[in-house]
Image (cartoon, rainbow, N blue to C red):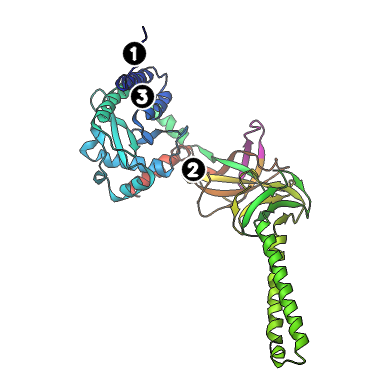
Amino acid sequence: MNASVPGALEQLLAHYLKLERQARSAPSVEELAFSMVNDSQALFGYRHGALLIAGKVRALTGVSSVEPNAPFVVFIERAARGLAASDRFALPGVVPPESLDQACRDDWQALSAPHAFWLPLKDRQGVVFGGLWLARDMPWNDAEQALLAQLGDCYSHAWRALQPGKPWRLRWPARTRWALAAALLLVLLVPVRQSVLAPAEVAPRNGQVVAAPLDGVVAEFTVKPNQAVKAGEVLVRFDATTLRAQADVAERTLGVAEAELKANTQRAFSDADSSARLDLLAARVEQKRAERDYARNLLARTEVRAERDGIAVFADAQRYIGKPMRTGERLMEIADPAQAELRIELPVADAIGLEKGAEVALFLDSDPLNRHNAVLERVAYQAQNTPAGQLAYRLDASFEDAPPRIGLRGTAKVFGDRAPLALYLLRRPLAALRQAVGL
C-alpha cells in the first residue's frame, strides 16, 4: 500500500515545525540570528528581513556581516525607533506607512519592499527587546500573520535561552570598590597612542591611465592582468567593422569629388558655368578629404597602444569584452612595479585626527605575519562612497622599503597623536552621544 502524498497544509506545517526546531536547537545567538532572517524566507516569501536587538540591526537576509553605516541599516533602525513611539511596537502586524515620518517613508520606498511586517520579540515580562522587519512585494494575509506571531514567541524563547541576562552584583567591601574605582580612573588617564584600522590596497604611483579613445565595443584584450608591456604594444582592440566601412565610404566619396573637380577643370576653358563652380568643388574635395582623414583616424584608434613601459593593472578582461564603452572610460592602468603607494579607505565612523608623516603599518591578507612600514602623505578632506557602499576618507601613504606587489590588499594600522586611554576607548560612544543630543 503506497503512502499518500502530503498536501499543501501538511507541507506548511512541516516547514513551520522545522523552523521551530532549528530555532530551539541553535547553539549560539549568531546562528540563531542567521536562521531568523534566512530560514523562514522560503515559507513566507519575503524579499529581505532584518533582526533588531536593542535598537541595532544584528542580522540581514543574505548578508554575512552587517555594515552599521549602510543606508538600509540606518533606515531599519530609524523605522524601529519610529515604531517604538507608537502602540504598534509591542504588537505583531503589518506596518502602516502613516505610522512613520516622511523621511522614513521616502527611504522605505527607495530601500525596502512595499509591504512590511513587524514581529516583536519579548522577554518574560512582556517587554520588547527586539524584533524582525520582514518586507515583501505581496500583502500579508491573516493566516500568515497568525503563523508569524506564533513563530515570534518561539524566537523570543530561543533568544532568551541563549541570553538569559542574569543580574550580577559585586559583593566586595565598599573600601575595596572605591580603591578599584580610583585605580581604574588613574588607568583611564594614562596617555596612549591613538590608532585605527582600515582596509588598504597597494596601488600604482604615477600610473598612466588607459582610457577608451572612442565610442565603441571592446573586441579583444591582447594583454593579461599584471603582464609586462612595452611602449607601442597593442593593449586593446575595439570592433572596427563599422569604422572600416565608414573609412571605405569616405575614400570613395573623396574619389567622386576629385573626379568631378577634374572634369569641371577641363571644361572650364570653354564653359563659364564650369569655371564658376571650381571653387565650390574644390571646397567640397577638401571637405571629403577631411572626412576621410577623420575616418582613418578613428579606425587607427581601434587599437589602443601602450605609451610607456610597465605592467598592465586591471581586474579582468572578460568584464570588458563585448561591452559598449564611452570615450574616456577607464580600461586599465600602466604602472611601474617598482613605484607603488598605499591607498587606505578610512571609514567615517573610525576617523581620528591624522597629520602628514604619521606612521602606518600594513598587514597583507596574503602575509599577515609580516609588517610593511609606510608614512602618511595625504588625507582627503571629503569622504566618498567606496565600491562596498561605505562612506570613507581616502588616505595615501608611501612605503619606507621596497613596496609589495601592486594589487595586494590588507589591513592598515594608522597611528595618531597621544590621548588619554578613556578617550581612546570611549571615542565612538562619545561621538554617538554627541550626535544624539546635539552638543
170 or 346, nearer to the observer: 346
Evaluate whether residue 433 shows in this view.
yes
Q: Residue furthest top?
A: 1
Cα distance between the residues tagged 1 and 2: 60 Å
Q: Label 3 is placed on what type of residue? A: Arg
Where residue 105 sits in the image (x, y, percent)?
Answer: 31, 47
Q: Determine the secondary structure under disc 2.
A: helix
**Up-down relation of residue 45 to residue 71 (above or below):** above
**Up-down relation of residue 181 to residue 161 (above or below):** below
| Residue at numbered disc 1 | 4
Q: Determine the secondary structure under disc 3.
A: helix
Badge 2 crowding class, 10 Å Cα cut-off, few under 14, some 14 to 19, many 20 or more, is some
Where residue 375 sits in the image (x, y, percent)?
Answer: 64, 46
Look at 68% across and 71% down and name the residue there: 291
Is 10 displayed left or right of 360 in the figure? left
Residue stretch rendered in magenta on the structure: 356-372
| Residue at numbered disc 2 | 350
Q: Determine the secondary structure under disc 1.
A: loop
Q: Label 2 is placed on what type of residue? A: Asp
Picture quadrant of residue 126: top left
Look at 72% across and 74% down and name the residue there: 256
Where residue 15 sits in the image (x, y, percent)?
Answer: 35, 21
User: Which quadrant of the figure contains the N terminus?
Assistant: top left
Comes first in the chain, label 2 or label 3:
3
Queried whether the magenta region covers residue 411, the answer comes back as no
